[in-house]
Amino acid sequence: MALETFKATAQLGEKLQVETRSRGHKVIVDEPEDLGGTDTGENPVELLLSALGACQSIAARTYADKFGVNIEDLRIELEGDIDLDGFLNKADVRPGFSDIRYKLHLKTDAPEDKVKQFTEFVEQHCPVGDTIANTVNLVSAGVVIENSEDTPAR
């Protein structure tokens, strides 16, 4: 299969609320009130955790038959640690996650050794997990300055 490019847009709204769109789908992203938002959606780092959990869940469903694992129920609990002083520019620390932990809860009749092989495969083939665990080329395509004709000159 050839390389495929996925696209999304993010539009800043009121306060810290952001509307993201991809393939006609919309997600509202916001910060909790104590961080200056209006708490109308997950914040970006919660969304990253959710994306990881969703990706692993989708990979599990995609490969379950190949491994002979019947998924009766699957839930993934995720959490991550961030020193907010990095984001808030209060200290010289990373602004991103230092650690992310997850635990799979899988209800199945498959034997433990088969489940172990299956979950290891899922973890190795989750695109979001791979992106988090490995360096990715993050490249800015520049800044487009759009001057508003409606803004009065000062």
Image (cartoon, rainbow, N blue to C red):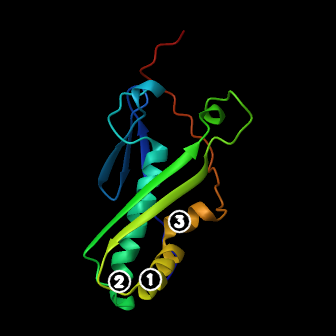
Q: CA distance from mark 3 to mark 2?
A: 18 Å
The residue at the far left in this view is 72
- CB under 8 Å between discs 1 and 3: no
**Mark toward the start of the polypeptide (1 vs 3):** 1
Labels 1, 3: front one: 1
Kind of element beneath mark 2: helix
**Mark toward the start of the polypeptide (1 vs 2):** 2
Left or right of residue 95, residue 2 in this image: left
Q: Is residue 120 above or below residue 43?
A: below
Task: Point out which mark residue 88 bears.
Answer: none
Task: Point out which mark residue 118 bears.
Answer: 1
Nearest to the observer: residue 90 or residue 154: 90
Kind of element beneath mark 3: helix
Residue at 64% across, 31% down: 85
Quadrant of image for the C terminus = top right
Task: Point out which mark residue 129 bears.
Answer: 3
Task: Point out which mark residue 64 bears.
Answer: 2
